[in-house]
């Protein structure tokens, strides 16, 4: 049975209500992937995934609370800007969490976790690694291609050229090959599925290339003369 996450501390209950209202009222149109569901889905969202991994990794209850707080806020920067949204999310978290009762050192730790979710960054602490693993949990899930399609739709909505099927799947394949899960529990639960998705991506590319060859390099049948 999949673990359903519900906020389990007083502060997280406040954060949960705040983030739900924020996504509902301020998230711009066109977010097919980085939407409320990505963060808040009760079993597959980043919050739920972070909680599951945290329990498997046996971190302290205090660290788990801070980790889940970071998971709630990690994509809120998209409300203000699309690229390099992590610093925006960290600043938003800083302003709100102090009002809720988080201490400055707790806020700083949460902000570092949010910043670590930038794909160009390298997580350092255990909790940063857990959040990164939770953010890309779908790389090893069966719904990967469904979500990858939503990301492609989102990029199209944002004006990016994603019309080339081969290029899209090639870039996605390179991303999955380069990616690594950091925590032992995530390696056990998702690495096998990720490798399966890599094989499916390779197969998709091979089929696309065959169709391309058939379309642009048709076989010309030459009739042999009668002897």
Image (cartoon, rainbow, N blue to C red):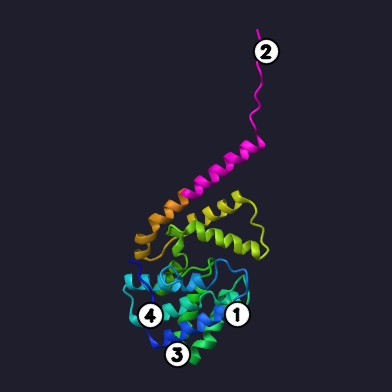
The residue stretch that appears in magenta: 200-227
Per the image, the residue denoted by label 1 is: 26
What secondary structure predominates along the stretch shown in magenta?
Answer: helix
- Residue 8: quadrant of the picture: bottom left
Image coordinates of residue 215 in percent, x first then y, are 64, 38
User: Is there CB contact under 8 Å for labels 2 and 4?
Assistant: no
Q: Seen in the image, is 46 located left or right of residue 217?
A: left
Question: Upstream in the sequence, badge 1 or badge 4?
Answer: 1
- What residue would you read off at disc 2? 225
Q: Secondary structure at mark 1?
A: helix
Q: CA distance from mark 3 to mark 1?
A: 26 Å
At horizontal 32% and vertical 66% (from top left) the residue drawn is 1
Question: 10 Å neighbourhood of mark 1: few (<14), some, or many (≥20)?
Answer: few
Give how far apart the Cα atoms at labels 2 and 4 are. Answer: 81 Å
Q: Which tag, 4 or 3, sits closer to the chain's start?
A: 4
Pointer 3 local density, CA inside 10 Å: few below 14, some 14–19, many at least 20: few
Q: Nearer the viewer, mark 2 or mark 4?
A: 2
Q: CA distance from mark 4 to mark 3?
A: 13 Å
| Residue with the mark numbered 3 | 103
Residue 63's tag is: 4
Mark with earlier residue (2, 4): 4
Q: Earlier in the sequence, mark 1 or mark 2?
A: 1
Question: Which sits earlier in the primary sequence, circle 3 or circle 1?
Answer: 1
Q: Name the element at disc 2.
A: loop
Q: Secondary structure at mark 4?
A: helix
């Amino acid at each position: 049975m999949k673990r359903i996450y519900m906020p389990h501390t007083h502060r997280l209950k406040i954060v949960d209500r705040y983030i739900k209202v924020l996504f509902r009222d301020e998230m711009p149109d066109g977010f097919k992937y980085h939407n409320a569901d990505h963060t808040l889905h009760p079993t597959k969202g980043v919050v739920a995934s972070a909680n599951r991994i945290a329990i498997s990794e046996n971190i302290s209850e205090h660290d788990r609370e801070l980790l889940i707080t970071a998971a709630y806020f990690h994509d809120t920067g998209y409300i203000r800007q699309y690229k390099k949204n992590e610093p925006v999310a960290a600043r938003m978290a800083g302003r709100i969490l102090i009002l809720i009762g988080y201490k400055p050192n707790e806020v700083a730790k949460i902000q570092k976790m949010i910043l670590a979710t930038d794909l160009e960054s390298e997580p350092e602490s255990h909790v940063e690694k857990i959040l990164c693993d939770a953010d890309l949990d779908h790389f090893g899930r069966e719904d990967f291609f469904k979500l990858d399609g939503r990301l492609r739709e989102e990029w199209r909505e944002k004006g990016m050229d994603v019309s080339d099927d081969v290029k899209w799947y090639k870039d996605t394949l390179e991303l999955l090959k380069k990616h690594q899960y950091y925590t032992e529990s995530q390696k056990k639960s998702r690495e096998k599925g990720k490798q399966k998705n890599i094989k499916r991506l390779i197969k998709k590319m091979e089929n696309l290339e065959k169709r391309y060859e058939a379309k642009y390099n048709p076989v010309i049948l030459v009739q042999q003369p009668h002897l």
